[in-house]
Amino acid sequence: MGLMEREVMAIAQWRDEYCTGYEIIDIQHQTLFKIVNQIHAEILKNSQNQALIRTQLEAFHQQAIEHFDLEESLMLEQDYFNYEIHRQIHKALCAKVKSLLNKLDQGTEAFPHKVTSVLTDWMIHHIRGEDQQMIQFFRAKNIV
Ligand SMILES: [Fe+2]
């Protein structure tokens, strides 16, 4: 498969406007996009490897926790005015992913195909909104 085809298949398309200019945060965001694309690629296969999808979703969960921890400690350090709301938004996403993992483990639910578009929409909305707002605050304080 050529690079172009792979690009077409990617559900989470990275755009320059998502860059915050804070390098570690941008790299972590791109990693989250990459994992969602890996999950999506597996979902699109005729015979999906459910165990692999579960592992990939677990990787997304771990990466999200690590990434949110970083943002939250930066916000605390900088006395960010919107810290509590931003943290709650992170918590809600983690809880959502965790509950899906639990359902998959209990075998009560097949993997819902819309998960990758839900995660993609969430990431884009969050990066363009709360994260850029947070970065603007950091920039005004000269830490970015
Ligand atoms: Fe965030």
Image (spheres, rainbow, N blue to C red):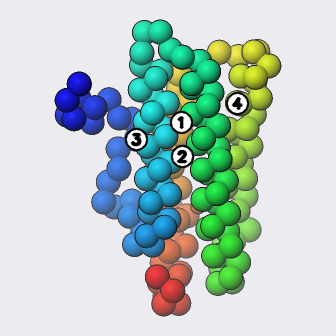
Q: Position of residue 86 (x, y in %)?
A: 66, 64
Determine the secondary structure under disc 1.
helix
According to the picture, the residue beneath numbered tag 4 turns out to be: 100
Contact, CB < 8 Å: mark 2 with mark 1?
yes
Label 1 C-beta lies within 8 Å of the nearest ligand 1 atom: no
Task: Characterize the local packing of mark 1: few (<14), some (14-19) or many (20 or more) Cα atoms within 10 angstroms.
Answer: few
According to the picture, the residue beneath numbered tag 1 turns out to be: 118
Work out whether mark 1 precedes mark 4 in sequence or the reverse, and give the earlier one.
Answer: 4
Q: Amino acid at mark 4?
A: Leu
Q: Residue at x 57, y 33 (%)?
A: 56
Q: Amino acid at mark 2?
A: Trp
Q: Amino acid at mark 1?
A: Val
User: How far is mark 4 from mark 2, CA to CA?
Assistant: 15 Å
User: How far is mark 2 from mark 1, CA to CA?
Assistant: 6 Å
Ligand 1 lies in which image quarter? bottom right
Specify whether 137 is left or right of 69: left
User: How far is mark 3 from mark 4, CA to CA?
Assistant: 20 Å
| Viewer-side label of 3, 2 | 3
